[in-house]
Image: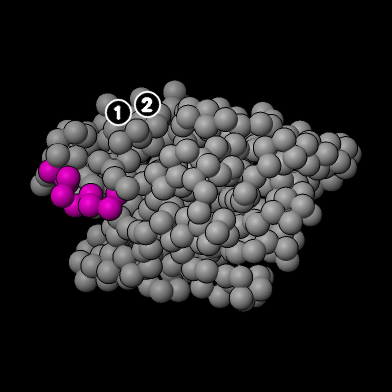
Amino acid sequence: MKQSINILLSGGGTGGHIYPAIAIANELKNRYPNANFLFVGAKGRMEMEKVPQNGYKIKGLWISGIQRSLSTKNLSFPFKLISSLWNAKKIIKQFNPDVVIGTGGFASGPTLFMANKKGIPTLIQEQNSYPGITNKLLAKKVKKICVAYDDLERFFPKDKIVKTGNPVREDLLEIDKHRIEAQRFFNLDITKKTVLIIGGSLGARKINEFVENNIEWFVAQQIQVIWQTGKLYYNDYKKYDKLEGVQTHLFLNNMNFAYASSDFIISRAGAGSISELCIVAKPTIFIPSPNVAENHQVKNAEAVVKKDGAILIEEKNLDAFQGVFNNLLKDENKQQALSDNIKKLALPNATIAIVDQIEKLIK
């Protein structure tokens, strides 16, 4: 097999689409050091910054999603789509890829559509338990579909599906070994329980408001709190650092230590987060975002809850939190069961499995 190959990847909009694409590129680079890589993203979106930071070239398309409510922004969508299809065709002609990989996001639609038209082998990596419209449409023409959940035959051709899981960071695979080091890093009292609260890199307004409403209760319960507020909200909540056992963080760069030091986790239910939490295997309460396409965070969380691997509290039901958390705190058997069951869902070798499928397409 030739070693100098051209690999085109497209994924963006959120970290949940970008980081899997970067993880896949890194694994491919390990196997084919002489390969040429190019990413295609959406202009103005976070991939245009994050991909170059990770050492890869990227080109941007003028593309965005359709607003689900009536909006004047939708008037420009047909023009953006035509522009993106034209530019994707031009990029593909110039780069001449051997394979094209899509991990979701606005730009992956036009890119993979044009690659399919040219007969180039394509693969999509679907992170969620409920796919978006773009991947449902692309599924008809792509060669392989790598998924992280069961029962996706409802949406995709069965013969194209391979269950691989979602790529995760390698430093999460043995976090238990680093618990004492992590507790020292966060200056925690090892005699007390710790809850880690994460709402995404930008932050989650509803989760932050909920934590603020319950912060005195956590302190009264002698629960230590590691609270990632997100950069949009940090200045509003950093004042709570003065409370005993509470620490706010704009962003957690050492997620492996954050996971290792915690006893309980409260999190959104993005596909990437869930894949990490299955490996971390701590008692977890999901508070899904209701503001995402196809309500996929709720569906992601439900797929884990169905296997008795986590607890789900929707934003509209947050008044029930103290009772739910108190019951969990007192029930060590329940804590152990949640940890054991979510760990059964972990697929730690996802990146390798996905790249194995890509190699078959290249060959």
- Residue 269 on image: x %, y %: 48, 54
Label 1 neighbourhood size at 10 Å, few (<14), some (14-19), many (20+)?
Answer: some
User: Which label belongs to residue 228?
Assistant: none
- Residue 14 on image: x %, y %: 57, 41
User: Which label belongs to residue 238?
Assistant: 2
Q: Which residue is drawn at 21% across and 34% down?
A: 186
SS category of the residue bearing label 2:
helix
Q: Tell me the quarter of the picture where residue 59 sits.
A: top right
Q: Which residue is drawn at 32% across and 48% down?
A: 170
User: What amino acid is found at the position of numbered circle 2 in the picture?
Assistant: Lys
Residue ID for mark 1: 241
Q: Give the range drawn in magenta.
A: 172-180
Q: Please state which of residues 21 and 253 is positioned toward the viewer in this rendering.
A: 21
User: What amino acid is found at the position of numbered circle 1 in the picture?
Assistant: Asp
Q: Contact, CB < 8 Å: mark 1 with mark 2?
A: yes
- Residue 298 on image: x %, y %: 55, 60
Q: Residue at x 30, y 36 (%)?
A: 254
